[in-house]
Amino acid sequence: MKSIKVETKSRSKYPYLGINGVGIIVLFTSPEKGVQLYYNEIKLGQDIEIGEYKDNIMESKFKPFDGEIILSNS
């Protein structure tokens, strides 16, 4: 039998992807700040488009997103 221990560095919470109840996905770069990467029907602040940065996001409404975001020019 073989047993291996791998040490990992603890990392800060940021950056991470967060998703809220209506499906908005944000790349959070620091507390309450980030870039909107996806929305279905509703946008952050109704006028924020994909790729736009916002510095007053209610981060408490988001949970970590465990999926993938695929960006392309197609």
Image (cartoon, rainbow, N blue to C red):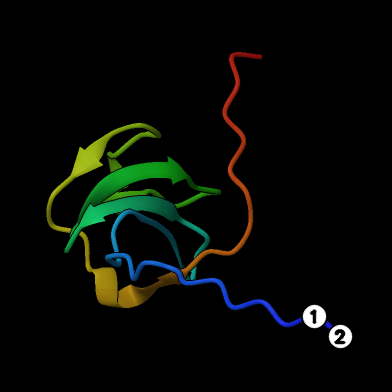
Quarter of the view holding residue 52: top left
Near-viewer residue (10 or 54): 10
Near-viewer residue (53 or 67): 67
State the residue lying farthest toward the right.
1
| Residue 13 spot, x, y in % from top left | 30, 67
Report the disc number at residue 1: 2
| Residue 24 spot, x, y in % from top left | 45, 56
Residue 6, above or below 55:
below
**Residue at x-position 37% and y-position 67%:** 9
**Residue at x-position 60% and y-position 21%:** 72
Report the disc number at residue 2: 1
Near-viewer residue (58 or 65): 65
| Residue 42 spot, x, y in % from top left | 44, 52
Quarter of the view holding residue 28: bottom left
Near-viewer residue (64 or 58): 64
**Residue at x-position 66% and y-position 77%:** 4
State the residue lying farthest toward the left.
55
Residue 51, above or below 64:
above
Residue 25, above or below 12:
above
Q: Secondary structure at mark 2?
A: loop
Report the disc number at residue 21: none
Quarter of the rendering occupied by the C terminus:
top right
Q: Amino acid at mark 1?
A: Lys
Quarter of the view holding residue 71: top right
Quarter of the rendering occupied by the N terminus:
bottom right
Left or right placement of residue 21 versus residue 3 in this view: left
